[in-house]
Amino acid sequence: MQQYCCIVCHMGISEDGFFKALSDRRRRLIIDELLARDQQSLFELCTRLISLQDVGISRHGISRHLQVLENVGVIEVKWNGNTKIHSLHPTPLSGLSQGWLSNF
């Protein structure tokens, strides 16, 4: 657990905040979508989540979930002109498998 705590604490994120961010099914679907196809705009994510995952959520709702994931360091954002491009940042997630969850 120490390694996981170090990763999360190093990023300035509480463990509870990190797990709370991952607790929402739609956020996990966003992570899955970025794992399958990294570097997507909000429009691309919305289109793929609605058509491939049958997620009934507005563009604004997805944007709020992306902000939560960005706040805990799971995704990174880069600007391409006027478009935000979202990418998966796997380090915090890999810390889960190397830390507390490795006990199971």
Image (cartoon, rainbow, N blue to C red):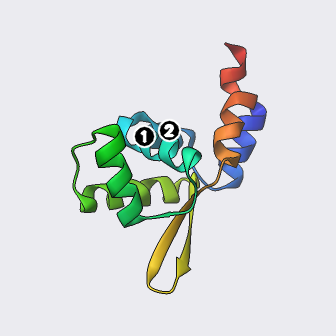
Q: Residue at label 2?
A: 16
> In percent of the image, x 42 and y 57: which residue is there?
66
- Observer-nearest of 87 and 66: 87
Helix, strand or loop at mark 1: helix
Q: Quadrant of residue 89?
A: bottom right
Query: Badge 1 local density, few (<14 within 10 Å), some, or many (20+)?
Result: some
Badge 2 element:
helix
Given the current orientation, which residue lies at the most extreme top position?
Answer: 104
Vertical position of residue 11 compared to residue 3: above or below: below
Please indicate whether residue 52 sits to the left or right of residue 56 in the image.
right
Q: Position of residue 55 (x, y in %)?
A: 27, 42
Tell which of 27 and 100 is nearer to you: 27
**At x 76% / y 33%, what residue is drawn?**
2
Quarter that holds the N terminus? top right
Q: Nearer the viewer, residue 93 or 57?
A: 57
For disc 1, the marked residue is: 29
Q: Amino acid at mark 1?
A: Leu
Q: Hey, what amino acid is under mark 2?
A: Asp
Q: Earlier in the sequence, mark 2 or mark 1?
A: 2
Q: Is residue 62 left or right of residue 29?
A: left
Q: Quadrant of residue 63?
A: bottom left
- Could you say which is closer to the camera, residue 44 or residue 24? 44
Tag nearer the camera, 2 or 1: 1
| Residue at (67% x, 12% y) in the render | 104
Q: Is residue 17 visible?
A: no
